């Protein structure tokens, strides 16, 4: 198993209380070669709630600064003893376009190998997980989502574009939702990522759903490659140890189906290609 570049430990407010050392042990037990710890750093809520004259609620958690400091320190310490695993220090930056100056400062932290850039919410709105879709103009909301992802892609504060279709993830009719009207902006996102030498993530978080799917689906990964995309990462977005590496064989096969013969990880923000061998082969 090659890589799982998007995992959350107990530092993330929505993850199980697992340590980095537990994750390293699990990764080694399954023969994973590269794993990144990427706890949540919501750029628009980096400081405690009082800084924003707001309150912590179930929906909105502030103080990502504490998450980042704890996660980076524990990951750096764990890097001293990782066995065969290469442990990469990462973070998932949410909502970069809402404060690109802060994101730029954090991106330059010397401990960081890679940053996943994600849009979990639009300015002034809750996370897509919490939205009341029957009372929203869904096509307009989805277009606004992809335009926000494009704004993220245009920054220099990320290495990997996270779960491209997150905005569609919780739609009541997600499987039937037609992305065709949004393909022009999605193409523009891909062209921007490619021009900047960044990567796209194939996120398997929902392979454990009753009706499994990936973010994005393989047709969009294929489109990314057609446009010249070369850097692809695979991830489970695991929020508990049992999902590290979960169904990675499925993700590897989808990458092959999309035409990829190599995967990418990042070391100190520099892309490193690793071969994606034929099905069933060993590296
Ligand atoms: Zn995310
Ligand atoms: Zn995540």
Image (cartoon, helix red, strand yellow):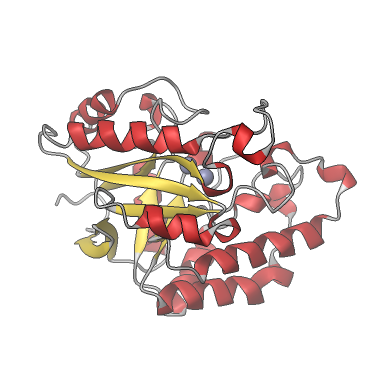
Question: Does the image show residue 58?
Answer: yes
Between residues 6 and 156, which one lies in front from this camera angle? 156
Residue at image coords 38%, 29%: 9
Give the quarter of the image for residue 148: bottom right
- The residue most toward the right is 135
- Residue 210 seen from this side: no
Front residue of 183 and 59: 59
Q: Is residue 227 left or right of residue 95?
A: left
Q: Position of residue 104 (x, y in %)?
A: 42, 60
The quadrant of the rendering that contains the N terminus is: top left
Q: Looking at the picture, how far across and down is residue 100, in whole percent?
A: 51, 61
- Which residue lies at the image location 11% right of the left edge and 34% below the top edge? 80
Q: How many marks?
A: 0
Q: Nearer the viewer, residue 185 or 148?
A: 148
Instruction: Please give the name of the residue rendered at 19% of the width and 28% of the height, measured from the top-left corner.
Output: 29
Residue 126 percent across, percent down from the top left: 71, 42
Quadrant hosting residue 85:
top left
Q: Is residue 62 left or right of residue 113?
A: right
In the image, residue 121 above or below residue 151: above
As drawn, the residue found furthest toward the top would be 17
Q: Position of residue 49 (x, y in %)?
A: 61, 33
Tell me if 221 is positioned left or right of 123 in this view: left
| Residue sitting at x 80%, y 62% | 140
In this view, the residue in front, 200 or 56, is: 56
The answer to which quarter of the image holds residue 61 is: top right
């Amino acid at each position: 198993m090659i890589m799982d570049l998007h995992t959350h430990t107990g530092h993330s407010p929505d993850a199980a209380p697992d340590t980095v050392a537990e994750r390293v042990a699990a990764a080694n037990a399954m023969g994973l070669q590269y794993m990144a710890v990427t706890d949540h750093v919501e750029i628009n809520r980096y400081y405690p709630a009082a800084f924003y004259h707001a309150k912590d609620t179930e929906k909105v958690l502030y103080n990502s600064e504490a998450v980042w400091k704890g996660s980076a320190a524990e990951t750096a310490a764990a890097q001293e003893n990782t066995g065969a695993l290469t442990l990469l220090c990462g973070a998932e930056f949410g909502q970069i376009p809402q404060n690109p100056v802060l994101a730029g400062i954090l991106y330059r932290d010397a401990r960081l190998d890679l940053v996943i850039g994600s849009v979990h919410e639009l300015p002034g709105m809750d996370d897509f997980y919490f939205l009341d879709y029957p009372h929203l103009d869904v096509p307009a909301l989805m277009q606004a989502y992809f335009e926000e992802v494009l704004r993220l892609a245009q920054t220099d504060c990320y290495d990997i574009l996270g779960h491209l279709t997150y905005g569609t993830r919780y739609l009541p009719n997600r499987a039937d939702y037609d992305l065709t009207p949004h393909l022009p902006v999605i193409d523009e996102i891909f062209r921007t990522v490619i021009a900047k030498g960044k990567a796209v993530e194939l996120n398997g978080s929902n392979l454990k759903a009753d009706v499994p799917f990936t973010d994005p689906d393989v047709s969009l990964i294929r489109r990314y490659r057609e446009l010249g995309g070369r850097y692809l990462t695979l991830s489970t977005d695991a929020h508990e140890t049992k999902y590290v590496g979960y169904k990675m064989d499925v993700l590897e096969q989808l990458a092959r189906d999309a035409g990829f013969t190599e995967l990418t990880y990042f070391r100190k923000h520099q892309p490193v290609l690793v071969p994606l061998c034929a099905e069933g082969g060993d590296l």
